[in-house]
Amino acid sequence: MKVLLRNPRREVEVDGPIRVLTLLDRLELNRESVLVVRGDTLVPGDAVLDDSDEIEIRPVISGGEGPLRSGAEQHRRPVASAAPELLSAAKPLECDGGSQ
């Protein structure tokens, strides 16, 4: 099977049939840091790849911001970044030690 790897870009031939997880182990790739794609479909780790398959192994990339929002939503801040301001303005609860 033809395996196209990204970052760095290279192509290798691997004999099939072989399970995705076995292939990743053989290529010494961390299964949580890559996506395995056959055509336009993500392939799960327990799938069996055939000798005639052409697959691509892409690194998982994360980060950045989501899509821009419109109107008033653009001016809202995420809850996580607003939390420190809310906590610093909050007053501690007073307890009298008894039951209410």
Image (cartoon, helix red, strand yellow):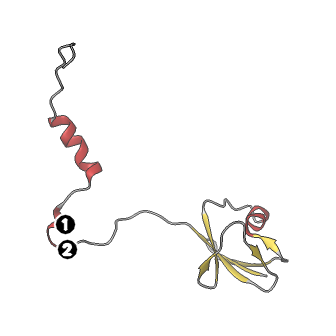
In the displayed structure image, the side of residue 12 where residue 4 appears, left or right: left
Disc 1 designates what residue?
73
* Looking at the image, residue 85 lies above or below residue 95: below
Q: Position of residue 72 (x, y in %)?
A: 14, 67
- Which residue is depicted at the point 17% across and 14% down? 96
Q: Can you say which quadrant of the picture contains the C terminus?
A: top left
Residue contact at pointers 1 and 2, CB within 8 angstroms:
yes
Closest to the observer: 11 or 100?
100
Disc 2 designates what residue?
70
The image quadrant of residue 48 is bottom right
- Which residue is depicted at the point 18% across and 26% down? 92
* Looking at the image, residue 1 lies above or below residue 44: below
Q: Residues within 10 Å of mark 1 (few under 14, many from 20)?
A: few
Q: Give the alpha-carbon distance from disc 1 to disc 2, as whole Å.
A: 6 Å
Secondary structure beneath label 2: loop
Residue type beneath disc 2 = Ser
Secondary structure beneath label 1: helix
Q: Can you say which quadrant of the picture contains the N terminus?
A: bottom right
Residue type beneath disc 1 = Glu
